[in-house]
Protein backbone atom coordinates (compact mmCIF):
# COMPACT_ATOMS: atom_id res chain seq x y z
CA UNK A 1 0.00 0.00 0.00
CA UNK A 2 2.83 2.40 0.81
CA UNK A 3 5.48 1.29 -1.67
CA UNK A 4 4.77 4.07 -4.20
CA UNK A 5 5.31 6.82 -1.62
CA UNK A 6 8.87 8.02 -1.10
CA UNK A 7 9.77 7.75 2.57
CA UNK A 8 13.34 8.78 3.25
CA UNK A 9 15.68 9.33 6.19
CA UNK A 10 17.64 12.60 6.05
CA UNK A 11 20.81 13.14 8.08
CA UNK A 12 20.61 16.80 9.07
CA UNK A 13 23.97 16.68 10.84
CA UNK A 14 24.89 17.36 14.46
CA UNK A 15 23.23 14.10 15.50
CA UNK A 16 19.83 15.07 14.11
CA UNK A 17 17.67 13.20 11.59
CA UNK A 18 14.34 13.66 9.85
CA UNK A 19 12.06 11.08 8.24
CA UNK A 20 10.13 12.72 5.41
CA UNK A 21 7.14 11.05 3.77
CA UNK A 22 5.98 11.77 0.26
CA UNK A 23 4.73 15.21 -0.70
CA UNK A 24 3.25 15.92 2.71
CA UNK A 25 -0.38 15.67 1.64
CA UNK A 26 -3.18 14.36 3.87
CA UNK A 27 -1.71 11.90 6.40
CA UNK A 28 1.86 11.89 5.06
CA UNK A 29 3.62 13.43 8.05
CA UNK A 30 7.23 13.67 9.18
CA UNK A 31 9.17 12.43 12.20
CA UNK A 32 12.52 13.30 13.75
CA UNK A 33 15.37 11.88 15.83
CA UNK A 34 17.67 13.82 18.17
CA UNK A 35 20.77 12.06 19.48
CA UNK A 36 22.56 13.02 22.69
CA UNK A 37 25.53 11.62 24.55
CA UNK A 38 25.55 8.28 26.37
CA UNK A 39 23.38 6.68 23.67
CA UNK A 40 20.35 8.76 24.65
CA UNK A 41 17.88 9.53 21.86
CA UNK A 42 14.72 11.56 21.49
CA UNK A 43 12.07 10.87 18.84
CA UNK A 44 9.73 13.57 17.56
CA UNK A 45 6.32 12.16 16.57
CA UNK A 46 5.28 8.73 15.42
CA UNK A 47 3.26 8.19 12.24
CA UNK A 48 -0.27 7.39 11.08
CA UNK A 49 -0.09 3.59 11.35
CA UNK A 50 1.87 0.89 13.10
CA UNK A 51 3.49 -0.25 9.86
CA UNK A 52 4.64 3.27 8.95
CA UNK A 53 5.96 3.84 12.47
CA UNK A 54 7.83 0.51 12.47
CA UNK A 55 9.47 1.47 9.18
CA UNK A 56 10.76 4.75 10.59
CA UNK A 57 11.94 3.06 13.80
CA UNK A 58 13.87 0.53 11.70
CA UNK A 59 15.43 3.34 9.67
CA UNK A 60 16.50 5.18 12.82
CA UNK A 61 18.05 2.02 14.24
CA UNK A 62 20.01 1.33 11.08
CA UNK A 63 21.44 4.86 11.20
CA UNK A 64 21.86 5.06 14.99
CA UNK A 65 22.12 1.73 16.84
CA UNK A 66 21.30 3.51 20.13
CA UNK A 67 17.84 4.21 18.70
CA UNK A 68 16.97 0.62 19.56
CA UNK A 69 15.78 2.25 22.78
CA UNK A 70 13.92 5.54 22.47
CA UNK A 71 14.36 7.41 25.75
CA UNK A 72 11.93 10.24 25.07
CA UNK A 73 9.10 10.57 22.54
CA UNK A 74 7.71 14.06 21.99
CA UNK A 75 4.30 14.48 20.36
CA UNK A 76 4.10 17.84 18.62
CA UNK A 77 0.29 17.71 18.74
CA UNK A 78 -2.63 15.29 18.94
CA UNK A 79 -3.40 14.37 15.33
CA UNK A 80 -3.26 10.66 14.53
CA UNK A 81 -0.66 11.00 11.79
CA UNK A 82 1.72 12.13 14.56
CA UNK A 83 0.57 9.83 17.39
CA UNK A 84 -1.09 6.58 16.23
CA UNK A 85 2.25 4.73 16.37
CA UNK A 86 3.10 5.77 19.95
CA UNK A 87 2.38 2.26 21.24
CA UNK A 88 5.43 0.95 19.36
CA UNK A 89 7.84 3.14 21.31
CA UNK A 90 7.89 0.98 24.41
CA UNK A 91 9.09 2.34 27.72
CA UNK A 92 9.71 5.91 26.58
CA UNK A 93 8.76 9.07 28.37
CA UNK A 94 6.04 10.47 26.12
CA UNK A 95 5.81 14.24 26.37
CA UNK A 96 3.13 16.52 24.97
CA UNK A 97 1.17 19.58 25.91
CA UNK A 98 -1.80 19.25 28.24
CA UNK A 99 -4.11 20.17 25.36
CA UNK A 100 -2.51 17.47 23.21
CA UNK A 101 -3.37 14.86 25.83
CA UNK A 102 -6.94 16.16 26.12
CA UNK A 103 -7.50 16.03 22.36
CA UNK A 104 -6.07 12.52 22.12
CA UNK A 105 -8.49 11.35 24.81
CA UNK A 106 -11.37 12.97 22.93
CA UNK A 107 -10.47 11.18 19.68
CA UNK A 108 -8.68 7.89 20.48
CA UNK A 109 -7.20 5.71 17.75
CA UNK A 110 -10.10 3.29 18.06
CA UNK A 111 -12.35 5.93 16.50
CA UNK A 112 -10.51 5.83 13.19
CA UNK A 113 -11.01 2.07 12.99
CA UNK A 114 -14.74 2.59 13.41
CA UNK A 115 -14.82 5.27 10.71
CA UNK A 116 -12.89 3.15 8.24
CA UNK A 117 -15.06 0.10 8.94
CA UNK A 118 -18.36 1.93 8.43
CA UNK A 119 -17.87 5.47 7.06
CA UNK A 120 -21.56 5.81 6.23
CA UNK A 121 -22.36 5.79 9.96
CA UNK A 122 -20.31 8.95 10.41
CA UNK A 123 -21.99 11.05 7.73
CA UNK A 124 -19.94 13.81 6.16
CA UNK A 125 -16.99 13.13 8.45
CA UNK A 126 -16.88 9.52 7.30
CA UNK A 127 -17.09 10.52 3.65
CA UNK A 128 -14.41 13.16 4.01
CA UNK A 129 -12.03 10.92 5.94
CA UNK A 130 -12.49 8.05 3.48
CA UNK A 131 -11.72 10.26 0.51
CA UNK A 132 -8.71 12.10 1.90
CA UNK A 133 -7.07 9.41 4.06
CA UNK A 134 -9.16 6.33 4.82
CA UNK A 135 -8.52 4.58 1.52
CA UNK A 136 -4.80 5.40 1.52
CA UNK A 137 -3.72 3.89 4.83
CA UNK A 138 -4.12 0.59 6.66
CA UNK A 139 -5.38 1.50 10.13
CA UNK A 140 -5.63 -2.06 11.43
CA UNK A 141 -2.50 -1.62 13.58
CA UNK A 142 -3.03 1.82 15.12
CA UNK A 143 -2.90 2.25 18.88
CA UNK A 144 -3.85 4.72 21.58
CA UNK A 145 -0.97 5.67 23.87
CA UNK A 146 -1.15 9.34 24.91
CA UNK A 147 1.60 11.35 26.61
CA UNK A 148 2.46 10.28 30.15
CA UNK A 149 4.09 13.64 30.89
CA UNK A 150 2.50 16.98 30.01
CA UNK A 151 3.30 20.67 30.29
CA UNK A 152 1.85 24.08 29.53
CA UNK A 153 3.80 26.98 28.06
CA UNK A 154 7.43 25.88 27.95
CA UNK A 155 9.55 22.94 29.01
CA UNK A 156 13.33 22.49 29.00
CA UNK A 157 14.78 19.03 28.49
CA UNK A 158 18.31 17.77 28.91
CA UNK A 159 18.76 14.37 27.27
CA UNK A 160 22.23 12.91 26.95
CA UNK A 161 23.70 16.30 27.76
CA UNK A 162 21.74 17.95 24.96
CA UNK A 163 19.45 20.91 25.56
CA UNK A 164 16.02 20.75 23.93
CA UNK A 165 13.43 23.51 24.30
CA UNK A 166 9.72 22.79 23.98
CA UNK A 167 7.38 25.72 23.41
CA UNK A 168 3.60 25.57 23.20
CA UNK A 169 2.36 27.79 20.36
CA UNK A 170 -1.21 26.56 20.09
CA UNK A 171 -4.06 26.91 19.74
CA UNK A 172 -3.32 27.16 16.03
CA UNK A 173 -3.53 24.02 13.90
CA UNK A 174 -4.78 22.19 17.01
CA UNK A 175 -5.34 23.31 20.59
CA UNK A 176 -1.95 22.12 21.84
CA UNK A 177 0.70 22.62 19.12
CA UNK A 178 4.31 22.69 20.29
CA UNK A 179 7.66 23.17 18.56
CA UNK A 180 10.88 21.39 19.48
CA UNK A 181 14.00 23.56 19.29
CA UNK A 182 17.54 22.16 19.42
CA UNK A 183 19.63 25.32 19.92
CA UNK A 184 23.12 23.84 19.48
CA UNK A 185 22.09 22.36 16.12
CA UNK A 186 20.21 25.50 15.00
CA UNK A 187 17.24 23.29 14.16
CA UNK A 188 13.53 23.27 15.01
CA UNK A 189 10.98 20.49 14.56
CA UNK A 190 7.66 22.26 14.18
CA UNK A 191 4.96 19.62 13.89
CA UNK A 192 2.03 21.05 11.97
CA UNK A 193 2.76 24.63 12.92
CA UNK A 194 4.60 24.50 9.57
CA UNK A 195 3.33 22.90 6.38
CA UNK A 196 5.80 23.12 3.50
CA UNK A 197 4.35 22.89 0.00
CA UNK A 198 0.78 22.43 1.19
CA UNK A 199 -2.01 24.61 2.51
CA UNK A 200 -2.21 24.63 6.30
CA UNK A 201 -5.52 23.87 7.98
CA UNK A 202 -6.86 25.65 11.05
CA UNK A 203 -8.78 23.27 13.28
CA UNK A 204 -8.36 25.43 16.39
CA UNK A 205 -6.99 28.91 15.77
CA UNK A 206 -7.51 31.82 15.82
CA UNK A 207 -5.48 32.59 12.74
CA UNK A 208 -3.63 35.37 14.57
CA UNK A 209 -2.14 32.79 16.94
CA UNK A 210 -0.72 30.89 13.98
CA UNK A 211 0.76 34.07 12.55
CA UNK A 212 2.35 34.70 15.95
CA UNK A 213 3.68 31.12 15.94
CA UNK A 214 5.39 31.82 12.62
CA UNK A 215 6.90 34.97 14.12
CA UNK A 216 8.23 32.93 17.05
CA UNK A 217 9.95 30.49 14.70
CA UNK A 218 11.32 33.30 12.55
CA UNK A 219 12.80 34.81 15.71
CA UNK A 220 14.77 31.67 16.59
CA UNK A 221 18.47 31.40 15.77
CA UNK A 222 18.04 28.48 13.36
CA UNK A 223 19.04 27.31 9.91
CA UNK A 224 16.93 24.15 9.58
CA UNK A 225 13.17 23.70 9.88
CA UNK A 226 11.69 20.21 9.91
CA UNK A 227 7.99 20.77 9.17
CA UNK A 228 5.13 18.50 10.10
CA UNK A 229 4.45 17.90 6.42
CA UNK A 230 6.64 18.43 3.36
CA UNK A 231 10.33 18.76 2.68
CA UNK A 232 12.93 20.03 5.14
CA UNK A 233 13.19 23.79 4.74
CA UNK A 234 14.27 27.02 6.39
CA UNK A 235 13.05 30.45 7.39
CA UNK A 236 12.01 31.56 3.86
CA UNK A 237 9.38 28.82 3.80
CA UNK A 238 8.12 29.82 7.25
CA UNK A 239 7.84 33.39 5.98
CA UNK A 240 5.87 32.14 2.98
CA UNK A 241 3.48 30.34 5.33
CA UNK A 242 3.07 33.51 7.36
CA UNK A 243 2.36 35.47 4.16
CA UNK A 244 -0.32 32.92 3.26
CA UNK A 245 -2.03 33.21 6.65
CA UNK A 246 -1.97 37.01 6.51
CA UNK A 247 -3.40 36.89 2.98
CA UNK A 248 -6.27 34.62 4.03
CA UNK A 249 -6.97 36.75 7.09
CA UNK A 250 -7.00 39.98 5.06
CA UNK A 251 -9.13 38.69 2.19
CA UNK A 252 -11.60 36.86 4.42
CA UNK A 253 -11.99 40.02 6.51
CA UNK A 254 -12.82 42.02 3.39
CA UNK A 255 -15.36 39.41 2.34
CA UNK A 256 -16.94 39.51 5.81
CA UNK A 257 -17.19 43.31 5.66
CA UNK A 258 -18.82 43.02 2.23
CA UNK A 259 -21.55 40.79 3.64
CA UNK A 260 -20.54 37.48 2.07
CA UNK A 261 -21.31 34.27 3.94
CA UNK A 262 -18.36 32.16 5.07
CA UNK A 263 -19.04 29.61 2.33
CA UNK A 264 -19.16 32.31 -0.34
CA UNK A 265 -15.98 33.86 1.01
CA UNK A 266 -14.11 30.54 0.75
CA UNK A 267 -14.63 30.68 -3.02
CA UNK A 268 -13.74 34.37 -3.21
CA UNK A 269 -10.43 34.25 -1.37
CA UNK A 270 -7.70 34.28 -4.00
CA UNK A 271 -3.97 33.79 -3.66
CA UNK A 272 -2.33 33.10 -7.02
CA UNK A 273 1.10 33.07 -5.38
CA UNK A 274 0.11 29.91 -3.50
CA UNK A 275 -1.67 28.11 -6.33
CA UNK A 276 1.00 25.38 -6.54
CA UNK A 277 0.52 24.35 -2.91
CA UNK A 278 -1.23 21.05 -2.23
CA UNK A 279 -4.68 20.51 -0.70
CA UNK A 280 -6.17 23.85 -1.62
CA UNK A 281 -9.58 22.84 -0.23
CA UNK A 282 -8.21 23.62 3.24
CA UNK A 283 -8.83 27.31 2.59
CA UNK A 284 -12.48 26.56 3.43
CA UNK A 285 -11.58 25.72 7.03
CA UNK A 286 -9.25 28.70 7.26
CA UNK A 287 -11.87 31.18 6.07
CA UNK A 288 -14.43 29.66 8.45
CA UNK A 289 -12.00 30.26 11.32
CA UNK A 290 -11.60 33.93 10.41
CA UNK A 291 -15.39 34.36 10.21
CA UNK A 292 -15.83 32.76 13.62
CA UNK A 293 -13.45 35.27 15.17
CA UNK A 294 -14.85 38.29 13.33
CA UNK A 295 -18.42 37.40 14.27
CA UNK A 296 -17.59 36.79 17.92
CA UNK A 297 -18.65 33.17 17.53
CA UNK A 298 -21.98 33.91 15.85
CA UNK A 299 -20.65 32.22 12.70
CA UNK A 300 -19.37 28.89 13.95
CA UNK A 301 -19.85 26.07 11.41
CA UNK A 302 -19.39 22.54 12.65
CA UNK A 303 -16.47 20.44 11.47
CA UNK A 304 -18.93 18.41 9.41
CA UNK A 305 -20.24 21.56 7.69
CA UNK A 306 -16.69 22.64 6.93
CA UNK A 307 -15.82 19.20 5.57
CA UNK A 308 -18.90 19.21 3.33
CA UNK A 309 -17.73 22.43 1.71
CA UNK A 310 -14.15 21.14 1.49
CA UNK A 311 -15.41 18.12 -0.45
CA UNK A 312 -17.27 20.41 -2.86
CA UNK A 313 -14.08 22.43 -3.26
CA UNK A 314 -12.04 19.28 -3.94
CA UNK A 315 -14.56 18.18 -6.54
CA UNK A 316 -14.24 21.40 -8.48
CA UNK A 317 -17.46 23.20 -7.57
CA UNK A 318 -17.62 26.63 -9.20
CA UNK A 319 -19.01 28.37 -6.13
CA UNK A 320 -20.45 27.77 -2.69
CA UNK A 321 -24.01 27.26 -3.89
CA UNK A 322 -25.81 24.05 -4.80
CA UNK A 323 -27.66 24.14 -8.12
CA UNK A 324 -28.39 27.21 -10.34
CA UNK A 325 -27.44 30.56 -8.87
CA UNK A 326 -26.40 34.07 -9.80
CA UNK A 327 -22.74 32.98 -9.82
CA UNK A 328 -23.42 30.40 -12.51
CA UNK A 329 -25.56 32.80 -14.49
CA UNK A 330 -22.80 35.40 -14.34
CA UNK A 331 -20.22 32.84 -15.46
CA UNK A 332 -22.37 32.03 -18.49
Image (tube, rainbow, N blue to C red):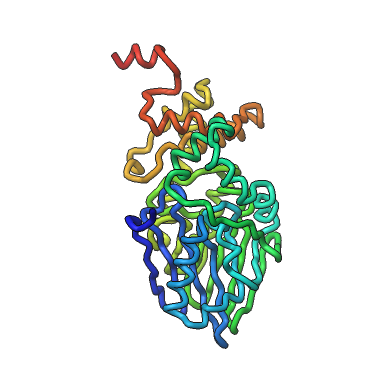
Relative vertical location of residue 122 with respect to residue 108 in this rendering, above or below: above
Is residue 214 among the parts visible in the rendering? no
Q: Name the foreground residue: 92 vs 196.
A: 92
Q: Residue at horizontal 52%, vertical 23%?
A: 261
Residue 63 x, y percent position in the rendering = 42, 78
Instruction: Identify the image quadrant of residue 14.
Output: bottom left
Relative vertical location of residue 108 with respect to residue 233 in this rendering, above or below: above
Q: Residue at horizontal 51%, vertical 36%?
A: 285
Q: Residue at horizontal 45%, vertical 64%?
A: 225
Q: Residue at horizontal 68%, vertical 60%?
A: 153
Residue 327 x, y percent position in the rendering = 38, 16
Residue 83 x, y percent position in the rendering = 57, 58
The answer to whether residue 161 is left or right of residue 7 is: right
Q: Quadrant of the C terminus?
A: top left
Q: Name the foreground residue: 286 vs 83.
A: 83
Residue 195 x, y percent position in the rendering = 45, 52
Is residue 4 among the parts visible in the rendering? yes
**Figure label count:** 0
Relative vertical location of residue 140 with respect to residue 302 in this rendering, above or below: below
Residue sitting at the far bottom: 38
Residue sitting at the far left: 332
Amino acid sequence: MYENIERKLHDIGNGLFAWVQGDGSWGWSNSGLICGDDDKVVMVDTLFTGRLTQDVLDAYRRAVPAADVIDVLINSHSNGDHTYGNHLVEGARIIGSTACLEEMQERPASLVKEVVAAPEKFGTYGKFFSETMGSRFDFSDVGHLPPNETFDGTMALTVGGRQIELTELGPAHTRGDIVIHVPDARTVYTGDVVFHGGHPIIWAGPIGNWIAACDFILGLDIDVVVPGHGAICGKPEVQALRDYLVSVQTQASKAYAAGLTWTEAAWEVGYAAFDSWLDRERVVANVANVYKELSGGAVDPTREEIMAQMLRYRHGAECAHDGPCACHAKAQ
